[in-house]
Amino acid sequence: MRIIAGSAGGITITVPKTSLRPTADRVREAVFSKLGELVEGAAVLDLFGGSGSYGLECLSRGAKRAMFVETDRVAAQVIRENLAKARLSGGTVVQMPVENWLRGRGRETGEGERYDLIFADPPYAKVKGDVDWNGRLLGDAVLPGLLVPGGWFLLESFARGGAGPVEGSRWELRDERRYGDAMIGYYQLKPDPAHAAVDDTAGL
């Protein structure tokens, strides 16, 4: 597994020796080809960071900063090591359950930091009884407030399960691409009725 392009292009990424499922190079290559120049100068949030592959790729391609949130202690340390190995600055790693981090952001007063790009690659829900992270994230009350107007939320899910609509969700599915077992959903916030006449979305 490697960083595909940019200042750290070609550098091998260490993958945690856990049950984590890293995003394949070909999937990331397709994602970043689609995002194009939106990465340059972006503030990035990488939820369920794993090896940090999404955020690392963003920093390598010119993102100004990336916040990695990862539950597993070993995986969080691997992200720090990958940042050092790739000599990438602007990365911050928080080792904490994603839902706890989101609750903490929800309790903050004031606007707080917001992001141009949010990536989430939660564990796949493959069988009945698995946690439906897709539904939780799309229905989360805090997450929409972390995205800047016109920003993008990319959610990776199990292709045979998908990330279907969530009643009352503030997210609009703008595109969806399948790569083997992986489905990438490209979401933006639904237009605010008070500003319905303004289109501030950045196209892909």
Image (tube, helix red, strand yellow):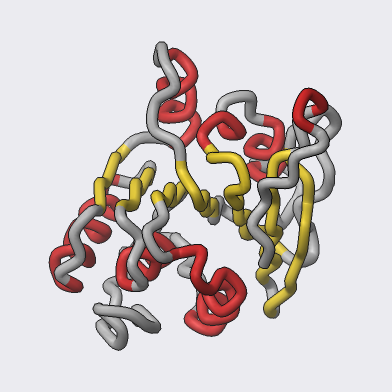
Taking 159 as reference, is 88 left or right? Answer: left
Residue at 25% x, 83% y is 11
Residue 1 seen in this snapshot: no
Nearer the observer, 6 or 80: 6
Q: Position of residue 161 (x, y in %)?
A: 78, 58
Asked which quadrant contains residue 191, the reply is top right
Residue at 18% x, 59% y is 89
Q: Quadrant of the C terminus?
A: bottom right
Nearer the observer, 163 or 113: 113
Residue at 41% x, 15% y is 110
Work out which residue is located at the far bottom of the displayed protein and give it. Answer: 10
Q: Quadrant of the N terminus?
A: bottom left
Asked if 201 appears above or below 13 in the picture, the reply is above
Asked which quadrant contains residue 202, the reply is bottom right
Q: Position of residue 59 (x, y in %)?
A: 32, 64
Residue at 46% x, 68% y is 22
Taking 84 as reference, is 74 left or right? Answer: right
Q: Position of residue 171 (x, y in %)?
A: 74, 40
Nearer the observer, 61 or 18: 61
Asked if 45 appears above or below 51 in the picture, the reply is above
Work out which residue is located at the far front of the displayed protein and give it. Answer: 197
- Total number of numbered discs in the rendering: 0
Taking 157 as reference, is 98 left or right? Answer: left
Taking 56 as reference, is 190 left or right? Answer: right
Residue 100 seen in this snapshot: yes
Q: Position of residue 182 (x, y in %)?
A: 66, 69
